[in-house]
Image: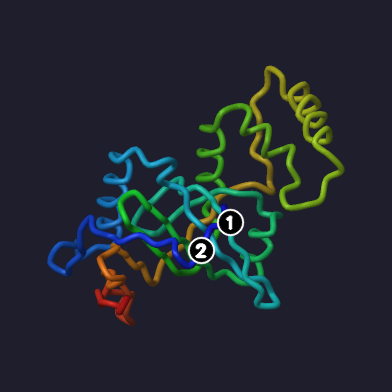
Amino acid sequence: MKISLADLRKNYTQGGLTEEDISQNPFEQFRHWFEQALESQILEPNAMTLATVNEAGKPTARIVLLKNLDEKGFVFFTNYESKKGKNIAVNPFGCLVFLWGELERQVRVEGKIEKITPEESDQYFHSRPIGSQLGAHISPQSQIIPNREYLDNRLQEVTQQYQNHTIPRPSHWGGYRLVPDAIEFWQGRENRLHDRLEYRLNDNKQWQIVRLAP
């Protein structure tokens, strides 16, 4: 059966987004939408696309998980020596995108990425399941490995090494915070005339709300 990609389309009809309906604080607005995504039982509503750029200006993107949110920004964790970690080291600006298709919504976040404190990384690391803690020691993320057995063998070695011991956080693993200067809330509407409201941080560090054409 031949599928015509040009014919794949959906008309969005669930609702709208007006300036009168949203919070003046973008973090409060995000929490409100996130709670609704949780209530809708969307699969991993904290999944977000993270886009970064290397020293040559080449972009790459991948899915990571939001693990904390406060008035400073959006926190995720990874291997500092991964491709994303190396990109951030040379170009500390990035973009996050949340897609909640069931709600016909999208949130886009732009800003500067910085490491969180070692203490914050330690606290989160030790809250993870034991298997995930071991995995952070095992995987040379983004590097070429010979086969699957390499990981399985390393898991056995590290499991024995830390048996009956507290597993330390590896120095190459920890958290980043994207500190936003722009957050856009997108609500699908009929006829592709979507609602796009963007919070922009002005020179006085105040959030200004603007409407963007769809």
**15, 162: nearer the viewer:** 15
Residue sitting at x 68%, y 32%: 134
| Residue 61 percent location from the top left of the image | 59, 61
What label does residue 46 carry, if any? none
Of the 4 image quadrants, the one containing the C terminus is bottom left
Residue beneath the point at 34% across and 68% down: 184
Q: Amino acid at mark 2?
A: Leu
Q: How crowded is the residue under tag 1: few (<14 C-alpha within 10 Å), some, or many (20+)?
A: few
Please give the count of numbered marks on the rendered protein.
Answer: 2
Looking at the image, residue 44 lies above or below residue 164: below
Please tell me whether residue 117 is drawn above or below residue 149 in the rendered image. Answer: below
Q: Secondary structure at mark 1?
A: strand
Quarter of the rendering containing residue 154: top right
Quarter of the rendering containing residue 209: bottom left
Q: In the image, residue 63 lies at what x, y percent?
A: 55, 52
Residue furthest to the right in view is: 146
Report how far apart the C-alphas of labels 2 and 1 lie in the structure: 23 Å
Is there CB contact under 8 Å for labels 2 and 1? no
**Which residue is painted at 63% across and 28% down in the image?**
131
Task: Of the two numbered discs 2 and 1 on the same chain, state the one appearing first in sequence.
Answer: 2
Looking at the rendered structure, the kind of residue marked 1 is Arg
Q: Which of the two marks, 2 or 1, is nearer to us in this view?
A: 2
From the viewer's perspective, tell me whether residue 91 is left or right of residue 204. Answer: right
Residue 5, labelled with which disc?
A: 2
Q: Splitting the image into 4 quarters, where does residue 152 fall?
A: top right
Left or right side of 82 for 108: left
Q: Residue furthest top?
A: 164
According to the picture, the residue beneath numbered tag 1 turns out to be 62
Image side of residue 124 versus residue 171, left or right: left
